[in-house]
């Protein structure tokens, strides 16, 4: 049975690397954030490359869900998405797909995100929305797989094997490496966000950082922490 895999990531995660990993599978198509234009249109968020993104993609999220995410394909499909894209979207379709909630330590998210967009808010970071999505899926009797970037980077092969097993698809060792540089599936926003992953050929080893946040950002981190702690307890581990 062909799978529709929706990766619900927080921003500034290694979600693009994971998309590249699934791209190496011979049985899988990948889609880069097909709901991004919808999110920008509905939220009014001023992101780098906003106008190019709005022109390049369908702006109606419900059409994206029906025509792209729930479309008919001859292979498994991997949709890289952000949890905060789920605004003004009927979540009923989540019962028809495999949902992965892809989390990261919010301190690391906040540090990285604030370098691109100043003074991020809870709605930008996405951790609370991931917590809400997990609970929504649980109440809907839908399976929610939780994946923590730290565990993935610490042991990519073991975690990918377990992830594939939970999705009920075969694991391919090809998922551990990809060619350096941009990919044809990249969104038009790649030039603003993807420099590091374009310079990579595999998952980079996890390195714990000593992060000191400014006072306002530290406050945001403390607000995010309980949601992250809850989710990481549910995540795939070696």
Image (tube, rainbow, N blue to C red):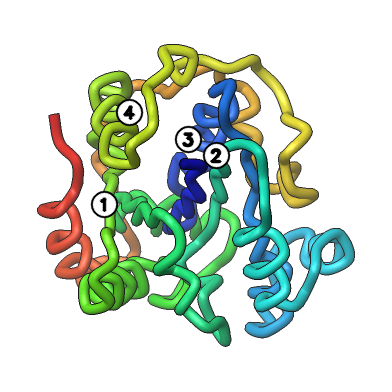
Q: Are marks 4 and 3 in contact (CB under 8 Å)?
A: no
Picture layout, residue 89 above or below residue 18: below
Using the image, tell me which numbered label, if any, was put on residue 160.
4
Mark 4 residue crowding within 10 angstroms, few (<14) / some (14–19) / many (20+): many
Q: Are marks 1 and 2 in contact (CB under 8 Å)?
A: no
Q: Are marks 2 and 3 in contact (CB under 8 Å)?
A: no
Q: Residue 66's spot in the image, x, y percent?
A: 66, 69
Q: What residue sits right under mark 3 in the picture?
A: 18
Give the farthest residue toward the front: 1
For the residues marked 2 and 3, what is the alpha-carbon distance in whole angstroms? 15 Å
Q: What residue sits right under mark 2 in the picture?
A: 76
As helix, strand or loop, the secondary structure at mark 3 comes to helix
For residue 152, which quarter of the picture?
top left
For the residues marked 3 and 1, what is the alpha-carbon distance in whole angstroms? 14 Å
Picture layout, residue 95 above or below residue 19: below
| Comes first in the chain, label 4 or label 3 | 3
Mark 1 residue crowding within 10 angstroms, few (<14) / some (14–19) / many (20+): many
């Amino acid at each position: 049975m062909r799978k529709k895999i929706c990766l619900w990531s927080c921003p500034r995660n290694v979600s693009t690397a994971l998309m590249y990993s699934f791209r190496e599978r011979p049985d899988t198509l990948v889609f880069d954030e097909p709901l991004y234009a919808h999110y920008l249109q509905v939220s009014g968020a001023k992101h780098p490359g906003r106008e190019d993104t709005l022109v390049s993609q369908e702006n109606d999220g419900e059409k994206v869900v029906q025509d792209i995410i729930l479309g008919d394909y001859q292979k498994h499909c991997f949709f890289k998405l952000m949890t905060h894209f789920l605004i003004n979207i009927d979540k009923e379709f989540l019962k028809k797909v495999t949902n992965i909630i892809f989390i990261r330590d919010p301190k690391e998210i906040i540090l990285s995100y604030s370098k691109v967009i100043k003074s991020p808010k809870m709605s930008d970071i996405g951790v609370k929305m991931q917590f809400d999505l997990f609970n929504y899926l649980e109440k809907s009797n839908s399976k929610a797989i939780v994946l923590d970037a730290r565990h993935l980077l610490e042991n990519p092969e073991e975690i990918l094997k377990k992830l594939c097993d939970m999705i009920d698809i075969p694991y391919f060792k090809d998922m551990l490496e990809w060619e350096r540089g941009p990919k044809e599936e990249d969104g038009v926003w790649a030039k603003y966000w993807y420099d590091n992953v374009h310079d990579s050929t595999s998952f980079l080893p996890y390195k714990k950082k000593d992060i000191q946040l400014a006072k306002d950002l530290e406050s945001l981190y403390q607000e995010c922490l309980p949601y992250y702690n809850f989710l990481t307890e549910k995540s795939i581990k070696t």
